[in-house]
Image: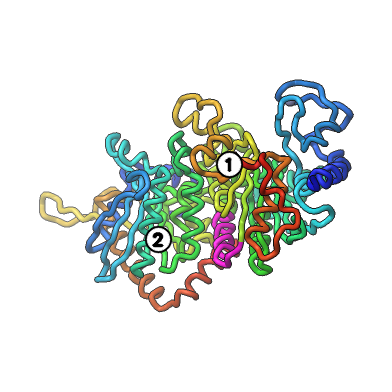
Amino acid sequence: MPFTAKETKRNEKAKDIMNQQPQVPEGLFQKCSKCNEIIYTEDIIANYHICPNCNNYFRVSPRTRLSMVLDEGSFQEWDKDLPISDPLNFPGYITKLERLRAASNLDEAVITGEGKLNGISVAIGVMASDFLMGSMGEVVGEKLTRLIEGATKRRLPLIVFSCSGGARMQEGIVSLMQMAKTAGALKRHDEAGLLYISVLTDPTTGGVMASFAMLGDVILAEPGVLAGFAGPRVIEQTIGQKLPEGFQRSEFLLEHGFIDKIVKRSRMRAVLSFLVASCGEKKLEENEALFNEEDVD
Amino acid sequence: MGEEITAWERVKIARGNTRPTSLDYIGKIFDKFLELHGDRVYGDDGAVVGGIAEIENIPVTIIGHQKGRTIKQNMKRNFGMPNPEGYRKALRLMKQAEKFKRPIICFVDTPGAFCGMEAEERGQAEAIAKNLMELSSLKTPILSIVIGEGGSGGALAMAVADEVWMLENATYSILSPEGFASILWKDSKRAGEAAEIMKITAKDLKDMKIIEKVIPETISEKIEENQEGETLEAQTVLLPTELTIENMDSLAKEMRIQILEFLHQYKNKTIEELIKMRYQRFRKL
Ligand SMILES: [Zn+2]
């Protein structure tokens, strides 16, 4: 199992990064937010940030995500530190952004760049749920558009891991325009005959869901992800009743035909590798991924 | 005069129950109109109307959000809030327009895409996303005119155009001011304050280069004769706030002229030029 060996190494490396990021608190132990079990933090990290007791998926930071998916050390970041945009002069917005930038190791709600997936170059973007709820304003839209355009120009397959509360309210209509901007760039990538894989992670809603997240040639989701146009609370307010269990979750989306596949975190790299290799000239060296019984539903 | 109206007042004007709707403009501006129905997948959404029209012998495709005035009409129109089939019908008719080389004119007037259970089950997000992507490179000129409320992604799905115009009192926003205030300040009662800060008026959006043109809401002079047969101008000077079907003729006439100008201007552009310009229009934002 060559993947497993590599994954282990990657996860060891991920530990260093994990010490700075908020989803898994520092310290030896942690309480699972779902089953309340006290678990070794190390066990959670070794298990792809999934609770070994109840299978609860913890949210992961973009850098951890990249380390779980890409070939070790292959990631090169693009377009870091674009200037802050504040089109509404919204009170306190710039201060808030600057504070967030200083407190996290992120410059915005998405990281973009290129890396290798089993030796094949890919353009990749990963959103950060804890940076203003992963909302999309001008900088997020601009970074993603540059990523897509860069991928089109260099003929790279594109992978975007979405997680977002939707459009960035503080930037008003400019945020809305990012939906059209990214969708337009994707159209060109598509017309160039290139592969775009959208991966939905928890949660993906609003303007992100209604633009690039739903436009993949292949759309994947982690198990149990909440993804939809309107958030559950908005729907409940509109219709005046409670939503059924599992509404807008990955399993619901699969059942209704909106995603291709639910992929466990432990299999994500293998599935992405297979897809990328299947759409390019270069074949996978380690293509056992295809025959893994876990990937057959 | 229009300058004195606050953004929040314009929100209320744009939502006004007597304000002309898409079908009113279509009837007044175009010479003929044949409505076409259905998305060929699930149903026919009453919140979106579409079809083929003629203006000075030029065939065009028209799509518009459609609101109702009475409760009964709004049952059918869902208050102008489309379900996925509304966007799919719009896209189907737009693709048809592309095939037959007809320019497209969209009338935007929606509080937003509908947030209901069935809308999610039938893929509201996918329907909107698909429109954004397809419209970005549709090979025919597209003009979108916001006539009332331009609510969020539900409006944008019909406004990925070569030019976007707005009526003077129309609004175009990321979210309703109530929603904005409730998300950012946890207090939907501060909607008025939110409206002022959000830059949602035609003038603000023109200044931000989000739209190309503001259409003043001039209304038809109301000339009345008194009982002695003297002609006198109506005592009450109608504010632009009171645009209705009764007084919309001069506005419709002006819109007709401007739409014809648009059609003649864009007729001369090559498809490559058109698509490139449309891409740049959104790319720079
Ligand atoms: Zn647990």
Q: Nearer the viewer, residue B109 or B168?
A: B109
Q: In the image, is B134 to the left or to the right of B185?
A: left
In the rendered view of the protein, which quadrant contains the C terminus of chain A?
A: top right
Q: Nearer the viewer, residue A58 or A144?
A: A58
x, y (%) of residue B253? Answer: 28, 63
* Mark 2 Cα shell of 10 Å, populated few (<14), some (14-19), many (≥20): many
* Residue pictured at 80% horizontal, 53% vertical: A71
x, y (%) of residue A212? Answer: 58, 52
Q: In the image, is A281 to the left or to the right of B210?
A: right
The quadrant holding residue A259 is top right
Name the colour scheme.
Answer: rainbow
Q: Is residue A79 visible?
A: no
Instruction: Name the amino acid type tagged 2.
Output: Ile
Q: Nearer the viewer, residue B34 or A50?
A: A50
* Residue pictured at 43% horizontal, 55% vertical: B158
Instruction: Name the amino acid type tagged 1.
Output: Thr
B122 in magenta? no
- Give the vertical position of B188 relative to A91 (above or below): above
Q: In the image, is A119 to the left or to the right of B108?
A: right
Task: Say the numbered circle drawn on residue A205.
Answer: 1
Total numbered circles: 2
x, y (%) of residue A218? Answer: 58, 51
Q: Are marks 1 and 2 on the same chain?
A: no
Q: Which residues are magenta?
A: A177-194
In the rendered view of the protein, which quadrant contains the N terminus of chain A?
A: top right
* Residue pictured at 58% horizontal, 32% vertical: B187
Q: Report the Cα–Cα distance between label 1 and label 2.
A: 34 Å
Residue at the disc numbered 2: B215
x, y (%) of residue A39? Answer: 82, 25
* Residue pictured at 70% horizontal, 48% vertical: A289
Query: Which is the main secondary structure of the residues drawn in magenta?
Result: helix
